[in-house]
Image (cartoon, helix red, strand yellow):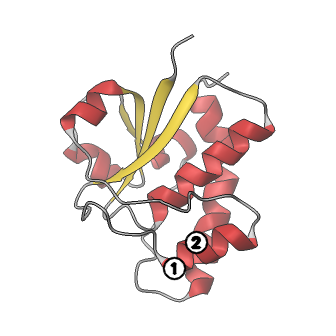
Amino acid sequence: MKHKKIVFVCTGNTCRSPMAEAALKAALKQRKIRWYTVLSAGLRAADGAPMSANSRIVLQEAGIPAAEDFKARRLTQKLVGEAYAVVCMTREQAAQLHAPNVTSMYALTGREIPDPFGQDVGVYRATLRTLLECMPAVIRGLQIQ
């Protein structure tokens, strides 16, 4: 069976989308669901930038593995075209992309994921908590099985 790609998208691909990527990977592993490749990208990412330190800290605190060699990537039309689903952190981000496979966290879960960039680690903890709470609805909404 061919792997289906799911791509989480935020602005810089250093905070929210890498946390969402790690959270979904962990949820799929826990459920023993295979055949999905989970990635993240940013609308204005600086290619090669590292994951934010606070994102890495809160993932580690939660016991969720994050790739040691994570590097930010800019969202490309090619990546959108290859994806089963592109999930943006906000409705505004989703509205910028014109493809049938693009959706938002709001459309799937009824919640927007605000950007914690530049804020203290407590805001990052709250962001990760929200993402973790949303993952069952993301899995249902994308019909992942």
Q: Quadrant of residue 55?
A: bottom right
Q: Residue at x 49, y 58 (%)?
A: 18
Q: Secondary structure at mark 1?
A: helix
Q: Nearer the viewer, residue 65 or 134?
A: 65
Residue 142 seen anywhere in this rendered image of the structure: no
Q: Residue at x 70, y 37 (%)?
A: 28
Query: Which image quarter is the N terminus in?
Result: top right
The CA span between labels 2 and 1 is 5 Å
Residue type indicated by callout 1: Ala
* Residue contact between numbered discs 2 and 1, judged by CB atoms under 8 Å: yes
Horizontal placement of 4 versus 75: left or right? right
Q: Nearer the viewer, residue 100 or 57?
A: 57
Vertical arrangement, residue 91 with respect to residue 56, above or below:
above
Query: Which image quarter is the C terminus in?
Result: top right
Find residue 79 and report its horizontal and vertical position in percent. 29, 35
Find residue 9 and report its horizontal and vertical position in percent. 38, 50
Q: Residue at x 42, y 49 (%)?
A: 40
Residue type indicated by callout 2: Arg
The residue identified by callout 2 is: 56
The residue identified by callout 1 is: 53
Vertical arrangement, residue 10 with respect to residue 137, above or below:
below
Find residue 70 and report its horizontal and vertical position in percent. 46, 59
Residue 3 seen anywhere in this rendered image of the structure: yes
Residue density around tag 1, few if under 14, some if 14–19, many if 20 or more, within 10 Å: few
Q: Quadrant of residue 72?
A: bottom left
Q: Which mark is residue 3?
A: none
Horizontal placement of 97 versus 106: left or right? left
Find residue 63 and report its horizontal and vertical position in percent. 76, 64
